[in-house]
Image (cartoon, coloured by chain):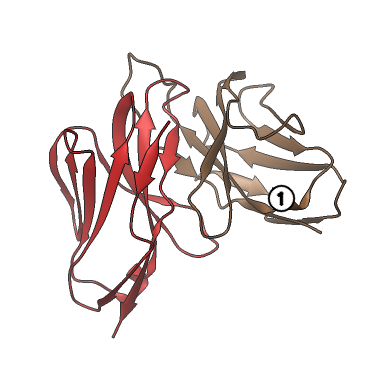
Chain colours: A brown, B red
Amino acid sequence: GAGVSQSPRYKVAKRGQDVALRCDPISGHVSLFWYQQALGQGPEFLTYFQNEAQLDKSGLPSDRFFAERPEGSVSTLKIQRTQQEDSAVYLCASSRHGGGRARLTETQYFGPGTRLLVL
Amino acid sequence: GQNIDQPTEMTATEGAIVQINCTYQTSGFNGLFWYQQHAGEAPTFLSYNVLDGLEEKGRFSSFLSRSKGYSYLLLKELQMKDSASYLCAVSTWGGGNKLTFGTGTQLKVEL
């Protein structure tokens, strides 16, 4: 596709409800990242996939957060039993190759985000 | 851990030049990015520095000094559409070269 797409763009959930956020990365991109952006703040890293492998999930704030990328393309971020503090914009980004010491970093291209509001 | 500092807000006049500074403390430095983010939109890539010096791209330039942990973004010939948040982000080795962002500098361009 032309860019990274995310759906839904907006989601309102009642506290305790489960939500699923979808990310379609740029076609052929190996790396996929999820970030959380609170109002007035910069994005904060949540998790990273290289193809279907989740290589880093150190930024997930609790075990209520779960991400998957089963076929190495589309990814879903799931939040169980949502809490008010989960309200934020969830950004997905992709880059062409995988990372690691042998490779210099590459530009990450961001989707428009899903704005989650938990009431 | 990582620590990235940038001013919260700046105001400048249309047609002028503005410099947005960013200082960082990090281990495993693998490059520094600048992104532009308009309200409610995705961050869009502006520039990338991995070696010391100045990178120029049209009206935008970015400078890096690794020894000082310092970068700046220079915007020339400011236009009203440049009003946005400017995010400084450091890439570190490992974890796919994940980005650690500053809080962003909200730039307001006035007539």
Query: Quick check: can you spot residue A43?
Result: yes
The residue sitting at the top extreme is A102
Does residue B19 sit above or below A68 in this rendering?
A: below
Does residue B93 sit above or below B47 in this rendering?
A: above
Rendered image quadrant of residue A67 = top right
- Pointer 1: residues within 10 angstroms few (<14), some, or many (20+)? few
The residue sitting at the bottom extreme is B111
Does residue B97 sit above or below B9 in this rendering?
A: above
| Residue A92 point in image, percent of width and height | 57, 41
Residue at left 30%, top 28%? B29
Instruction: Name the residue that disc number 1 marks.
Output: A85
Image quarter where the N terminus of chain B lies is top left
Residue at left 38%, top 40%? B3
Q: Is residue A33 left or right of residue B78?
A: right
Residue at left 49%, top 45%? A110
The residue sitting at the left extreme is B53
Residue sitting nearer the eye, A48 or B67: B67
Give the structural element (helix, strand or loop) at label 1. helix
| Residue B111 point in image, percent of width and height | 28, 86
| Residue B50 point in image, percent of width and height | 23, 33
Residue at left 24%, top 79%? B13
Rendered image quadrant of residue B60 = bottom left
Task: Name the amino acid type tagged 1.
Answer: Glu
Q: Is residue B25 left or right of residue A71?
A: left
| Residue A70 point in image, percent of width and height | 69, 22
Query: Quick check: can you spot residue A106?
Result: no
Q: Is residue A10 left or right of residue B36?
A: right
